[in-house]
Image: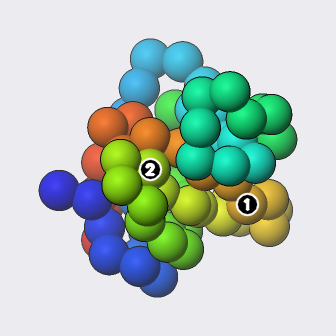
Amino acid sequence: MWAKKGKLAKWKGQTALKLRTKASVKARKVAKVKKGKKVRVLARKGAWVKVSTASGVTGWTKLAHAASVG
């Protein structure tokens, strides 16, 4: 289950998590998050979540790509 808005979530995949400008696989990539790094959940839209990194970068990623830690 994904963390609720404002909570932290941790990337659990094998490769870097891609953050995008919009909730679409066709949207431009704005950042990558390495495995084990935490992001803050800002919003949810269907199968996507908007997150921010510790460095302040925000972007959208698919729900299935991360696990709740909070």
The vertical placement of 23 against 15, above or below, is below
Query: Image point 59% across, 38% down: which residue?
Result: 24
Secondary structure category for the residue under label 1: strand
The amino acid on which the numbered mark 1 sits, given as a three-letter code, is Thr
- Quadrant location of the N terminus in the rendered image: bottom left
The vertical placement of 41 against 11, above or below, is below
Name the residue beneath numbered marker 1: 58
Label 1 vs label 2: CA separation?
A: 13 Å
Q: Nearer the viewer, residue 22 or 52?
A: 22
Visible residue check, residue 70: yes
Which numbered disc, 1 or 2, marks the residue that appears first in the sequence? 2
The vertical placement of 62 against 41, above or below, is above
Query: Image point 56% across, 61% down: which residue?
Result: 50
The percent coordinates of residue 66 (x first, y second) are: 37, 43
The amino acid on which the numbered mark 2 sits, given as a three-letter code, is Trp
Name the residue beneath numbered marker 2: 48
Query: Image point 67% across, 42% down: which residue?
Result: 19
Q: Is residue 46 left or right of residue 32?
A: left
Q: Residues within 10 Å of mark 1 (few under 14, many from 20)?
A: some
